[in-house]
Amino acid sequence: MFRAKTFGLGIGYCFFIVLPLSGQQLRLALQKRDSATIALQQKDNVRAAQLYFEALGYTQQSRSDTLYASLCAGIGDLYLYYSNIPKAIEFYQNGLEQRVDPALNYRLKLKIGQAQLSAQQFTELAQTLATLRTQSVETSAPQDYIQLLFLESELDLARYNYAQARQKLLKAQQTAQKHQQTELHLHALNRLSALAAQTGDMGAALNFTRERLRLARKFKNDLQIKSSILQYAQLLLQQNQLDSALALNDQLLAMRPIHSTQDTLSKSAWKQRSFILERKGLVAEAFVALDSLSALNDDNSEAEKGRQLLEELTISRAEQELKSAYQTRLERQKNDRFFLWIAGALLGVLGLFAGLRTWQKQRANLLLKAQNQKIETQKKELEQLSQLKNRLFAIVSHDLRSPILSFEAILDTLDEIGYTEPQRRWWLDKLQQQTTKTNVLLENLLCWANLQMKHRPSEKKWIVLLPLVREIKEIVQLMYLDKRVSITLHIPENLGLVQDEEMLRMAIRNLLINAIKFSDTGQDIEISAWKAEQRIHVCIQDQGIGMTEMQLQQALGGRLSRTGTQGETGTGIGLSLVRQFIEKEGGSLLGASAPNAGTRFTIVFAE
């Protein structure tokens, strides 16, 4: 009987203490959320994040699932803004774990899809979109359905399915128009224009941009009007309609900027104006445009400081107003809850001790997890070094042993009595060829090892191509005198680029050696170079035995080793080494080949 009474008193105590405290925590959470909303409107993301986290703490105590999920969505958006994708997805998932209505659940999944798109996690994005598609109802939530279509179109673009992407965007445009979602309608037109320009359909791109500009003017959307004009000018510039593009660009610059986003548009307009003027040959006016851009940047930096100060004052004032509104209500209940607060304080102390203990355990677990990750990373690095060592030993033992044995055989032969001077000269030429080949092999091995261990720094300078290629040609022809391969150069005398000379020399030499190795005696090889679209191209074309597409990919990956037309051997790392070095220096290696139809490799670097 005594226990039953005690239990009843305990239950009553919880109702009179815990429930009022829970209601107060909920009010505080709402206050913090409203303050965070104001901070976001003032573009003070740091302050908004602090308020969101404070509100989240209160919401966990008040057990309001819907409010908790909406706060998780807001924090996730902030992390997504700062490109912290894992944290953004973590908070979106936390929101999904709450008991919320289907509409909020759907929006949280949309946000996860947007985060996965930003991180280019296309496999995960496809799974998320499949789930969203089963929940999508166009008529009940048109804006959510349109966002789903946008995400699906981005996934199609990532997979180069341009036709499907266009269909999704057209569907999004029609849905936005049907449900009078003006902002989303304008956004769809913007994406359609960009997609049409990307696929080369400039007529369609211009039509979509004109429609976007018309709609923006109809609804007096200043930001969309200026953005549409900038896009229109860019499209005309791509079609080389310089006068029309310049006129639109000047029209944009004549508009008065209203906020920082449009200041950004002004910067883009000044930058585009300088580019158009340069294309028209008006270099002096182009420099004036660049000076205006620089001045705008300076002005904006001072304006940004003032804007930040104003934001801080506005947020502080809004927060004080919200606090005073809630404080008035709390003061009326202060006297009645004095004893309840004492009990709550005692419970808080107990909770603090429990939380401290839990925190200590979590901290210990985190430290242990970090140490395990560090050990795992070190283990992987040791395994990679071991594999590198084994491969080096294998190459050295196999590929260097053969030329050294050849040296020994040639020297023993020369040591014999009875050879005439022409015969001795022939053997010496062989020895010189073998020495040059071995030296090239050693250089490739050293470059490959340095690249694997990331020890080699880049040393770029201005290089004129013709003398460099001519020198490489003479060295490589000396290595393969017996083949009598003809090498023709088609390189302008003054063509050059800024690049690492040692890397460029190694790349051209390896490609030329491969071309000779897989060519028959007396065949021709062409080395040509040219400049196009602000890029330098160096092409080596042979008429040799060629290879299949699969063999080409294996060779580029360092997984193919074939003998030449006269039994020449190799390590299999030459072509892979060339590709890795070129990509490390910001270039690309393009290959094309077919069996018995020769091979063409092209090195492409920015000018």
Image (spheres, rainbow, N blue to C red):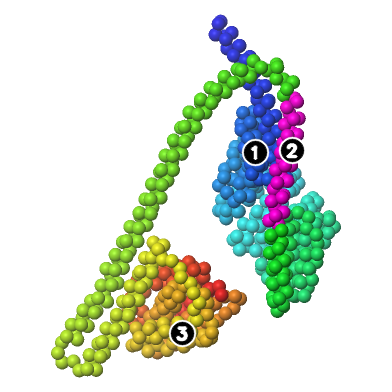
Secondary structure at badge 2 equals helix
Q: Nearer the viewer, residue 582 or 547?
A: 582
Q: Position of residue 589 (x, y in %)?
A: 49, 72
Is 327 covered by the magenta stretch?
yes
Nearer the observer, disc 2 or disc 3? 2
Q: Nearer the viewer, residue 401 or 165?
A: 401
The amino acid beneath tag 1 is Tyr
Q: Quadrant of residue 289?
A: bottom right
- Quarter of the image with the C terminus is bottom right
User: Which residue corresponds to the image point at 80% horizontal and 51% vertical from the top-left?
Assistant: 180
Residue 409 vertical position relative to residue 226 in the rendered view, above or below:
below
Circle 3: is it few (<14), some (14-19), or many (20+) Cα within 10 Å?
Answer: few
For disc 2, the marked residue is 317
Quote the CA–CA distance across marks 2 and 3.
71 Å
For disc 1, the marked residue is 52
Q: Position of residue 472 (x, y in %)?
A: 41, 82
Circle 2: is it few (<14), some (14-19), or many (20+) Cα within 10 Å?
Answer: few
Residue 172 visible: no
